[in-house]
Every structure is written in structure tokens, then in C-alpha cells.
Image (tube, rainbow, N blue to C red):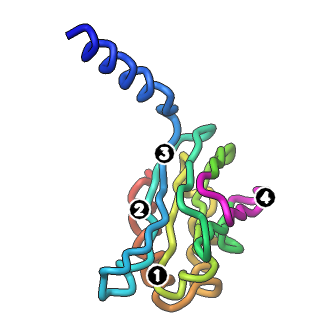
Amino acid sequence: MRCYMSLFLFLLSLSGNVNADTKVIKQVFDIQSTDLGAMYQFIPDYVEIDVGESVRFEGTVGSHTAHSIKGMLPEGVEPITIAYSDVSKVTFDKPGVYGIKCKVHHRYGMVALIVVGDPSVNIEQARAAAKKRVSRRGQEKMQRLLDKAELKIE
């Protein structure tokens, strides 16, 4: 019994190492799927966080990347470029919406939206940029994600 209790306490301590202020976005390639939109995706593709919190991107290996979409960042924010890394963590210090795409698979709809605090900061600029900077399939999905973010605006 003591052995099981020690194992339980050890596993519990490991779960405490995950920062509560960090969300995880996994990049998924589901070879079993016949739908291209489900084959290549960020899960989740919509994340809300507060200013100062982080997102951990998992699975940016091979041809999967996580790049910010030009025009879909708050003013003054450096572009996000993640490639060839199993895990990368990004801290978001400015409010607004951040459009993310896999540089290769966005043509299949592999896009995500991170909402940091108040989305009204740049949502209109982001919406316009999505129409120019994302493939047709990715654009349709991104506009739906932006619609969801817009519901947060008071």
C-alpha cells in the first residue's frame, strides 16, 4: 500500500509542473482521416488567454510549423516563427488576436486563433489580413474563429 501511495504522490507532483497559465496547442496529422480539414489541424484551434499567459505549441516537427499570419498580430508584436521543435512556448504580453498558421498545411485549413485579453484591439485588421494572407480553406475557418472572438467584445 505504501508503494502505491508513493507512486500516487509522485504522479501528483508531476502534474503540478504544468503551469496553470499555459495552454497547449497540438499540431495534428491524422493519416486515417479522409477529410483534409481534419487531417491537418491545430487542436484546439481557438484559445483564449489573459495578457502575460503562455501557449505551448507541441508537434512543430517535419513540415508542421506555427507561424503568425502577417497583419494578424497586435501592433508592435514580433512575428511568431516555430519550426523543427517538438515543444515551443510563447508568452503573449499584448492584448489582441493572433492568427497562426502552419506554413505548409494552411491550404488545408490548418489555422488557429489565439485571443489575448481584449480582441477589439486588432480584430478588424486581423479580419482583413485573413482575407489576403490565408488560403481559401484556411480563410473560411479563420473567419469563423474571428466571429467567435468577436462575441467577447463588450
> On the image, numbered disc 1 is attached to which residue?
109
- Give SS at disc 1: loop
**Marks 2, 4: nearer the viewer:** 2
> On the image, numbered disc 2 is attached to which residue?
43
Numbered circle sitting on residue 23: 3
Q: Which residues are magenta?
A: 74-87
- Give SS at disc 3: strand
Would you say 30 lies left or right of 89 here?
left
x and y percentages locating residue 44 in the rendered image: 40, 60
Q: Residue at x 60, y 56 (%)?
A: 86
Mark 3 Cα-neighbour bin, 10 Å: few <14, some 14–19, many ≥20: some
Q: Is residue 76 magenta?
A: yes
> On the image, numbered disc 4 is attached to which residue?
78
Q: Residue at x 63, y 62 (%)?
A: 122
Amino acid at dot 1: Gly
Image quadrant in which you'd find residue 119 = bottom right
The answer to the question of whether label 3 and label 4 lie on touching residues, with beta carbons closer than 8 A, is: no
Residues at marks 1 and 2, CA–CA distance in whole angstroms: 12 Å
Residues at marks 2 and 4, CA–CA distance in whole angstroms: 23 Å
Residues at marks 3 and 1, CA–CA distance in whole angstroms: 21 Å
Quadrant, the N terminus: top left
x and y percentages locating residue 9 in the rendered image: 35, 16
**Marks 3, 4: nearer the viewer:** 3
The answer to the question of whether label 3 and label 1 lie on touching residues, with beta carbons closer than 8 A, is: no
